[in-house]
Amino acid sequence: MERRNARDKIGVYLMPGLAASPEIFEHLKLPESRFEITHLEWFIPEPGMDLQQYARKMSEKVRHEQPVLIGVSFGGMLVQEMAEFLNPAKTIIISSIKCRSEMPSRMVWARRTGIHHALPTGLLSNVEVLARYTMGGRVKKRLKLYEKYLAVREKKYLNWAINQAIHWKRETPLPGLIHLHGDKDVVFPITHIGACQTVPGGTHTMIIHRARWFNERLPAIILED
């Protein structure tokens, strides 16, 4: 695939979180004169495909020579792996983790015990269960929103995604990585997070509920040398 050169607009690629659709970015607005946004979507993995192989396949969708990769939650893990196959100008993660040491204790416990293999992931087709599992917190008041945002509910994908997240292999942060994290995140509590730019009052779903914060600050973060 031919990649666009530096004279074009800055290509910004947005990767949603586990099971989420690109609609989580619907309120994110960047100046069209400077940025060209592409929404990436989860696809069903091929048999035996690990996260690195999945990242290589997803990277084929990138058309710019020096893209900006932005990933939310599990999508943040994925864009870090994609950076290994591309030449990104910036890699930015939101409500995510940079390496295994930032995983919360429940993920570490799941990795050690394998308990996640016993989870009835078929239940995650229920949007309320899926929202609690992937976004944390109280969701009853926002079920209609999550019905729209959590669109990828195939059991095969959910089994794969949960297993890849728990068994993520990255030991050290990607050099130059930019990490934006809310201090009210209950999925990835900030007490486990290393160096990051903290978003006051930001929850795990802040890309939806704090879009104004990102609209005001992301352009400068992307353009900063």
Image (cartoon, helix red, strand yellow):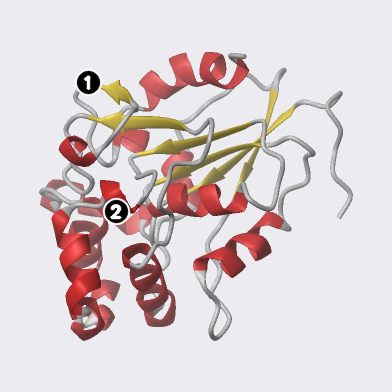
At 38% from the left and 20% from the top, the residue drawn is: 212
Label 1 Cα crowd, 10 Å radius (few <14 / some 14-19 / many 20+): few
Q: In x, y percent, where is residue 17?
A: 40, 52
Q: In x, y percent, where is residue 131?
A: 23, 58
First in sequence: mark 1 vs mark 2: 2
Decide which of 151, 202 is in the foreground and name it: 202
Say whether residue 13 is left or right of residue 123. right
Decide which of 22, 113 is in the foreground and name it: 113
Q: Quickly name the residue at label 1.
A: 200
Image quarter of the C terminus: top right
Secondary element under disc 1, as helix, strand or loop, is loop
At 67% from the left and 37% from the top, the residue drawn is: 88
The kind of residue on which mark 2 rests is Tyr
Q: In x, y percent, where is residue 192?
A: 20, 41
Residue 31: which quarter of the image? top right
Label placed on residue 146? 2
